[in-house]
Image: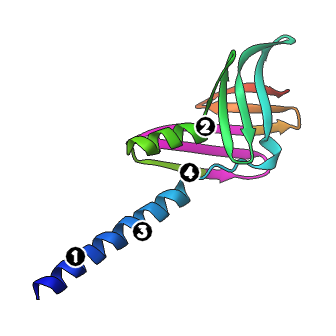
Amino acid sequence: MRKITCILAVFFVLISCSSTEDSQTAQNQISPPSWIQGTWMQTSGNASSGIGYKFSSDNICSILLTTQNCYKEMMETYKNTGAKTSTSESVKTDTEYKFSLTVQGTTTELHFKKVDSKTIYLVAGNINTPLTKQ
């Protein structure tokens, strides 16, 4: 009876671990819509401010001058430390995209609205910051 109990306990632990990994993998996806893919920068007059975002089919990178911080790599780094991460793409339409990354209970949210093929807004509350496609 003890052997059966031990075997069942190990079995349930293995099942619960693989299920968690599967759901965590499914949640940690980044897939921006095609209209937003490319590099978008905040401009002042005709010059770039050095602040913006770069979108690919499976990643989002924030740009500050010459430094890029990419969410896909950040999630991999957090995963390697054992931190719990999840992503959400709560709005993904032809004119709007909302992405959020949660790490250990702290959420970073990005919200973008398409104005036209060359301009999008980074939406933060009531403030719309225009970004221009490069």
Q: Earlier in the sequence, mark 4 or mark 3?
A: 3
Q: Is residue 99 left or right of residue 83?
A: right
Q: What's the amino acid at mark 4?
A: Ser
What kind of secondary structure does the magenta stretch mostly adopt? strand
Foreground residue among 57 and 48: 57
Foreground residue among 105 and 18: 18
Mark 1 or 3, closer to the camera: 1
Q: What's the amino acid at mark 2?
A: Leu
Q: Secondary structure at mark 1?
A: helix
Work out which quarter of the rendered image holds the C terminus and state it.
top right
Judged from this view, the residue extending furthest toward the left is 2
* Crowd around label 2: few <14 · some 14–19 · many ≥20 (10 Å): some
Q: CA distance from mark 1 to mark 3?
A: 16 Å
Judged from this view, the residue extending furthest toward the front is 3
Give the percent coordinates (x, y) of residue 120: 78, 33
Residue 33 falls inside the magenta stretch = no
Q: Secondary structure at mark 2?
A: strand
Q: Earlier in the sequence, mark 1 or mark 3?
A: 1
Marks 4 and 3 close (CB-CB < 8 Å)? no
Foreground residue among 54 and 81: 81
The stretch of residues the image draws in magenta is 90-112
Mark 2 or 3, closer to the camera: 3
Instruction: Residue 110: give its label.
Output: 2
Work out which quarter of the rendered image holds the N terminus and state it.
bottom left
The residue indicated by pointer 4 is 88
Q: Earlier in the sequence, mark 1 or mark 2?
A: 1
The residue indicated by pointer 1 is 9
Q: Secondary structure at mark 4?
A: strand
The residue indicated by pointer 3 is 19
Judged from this view, the residue extending furthest toward the bottom is 1
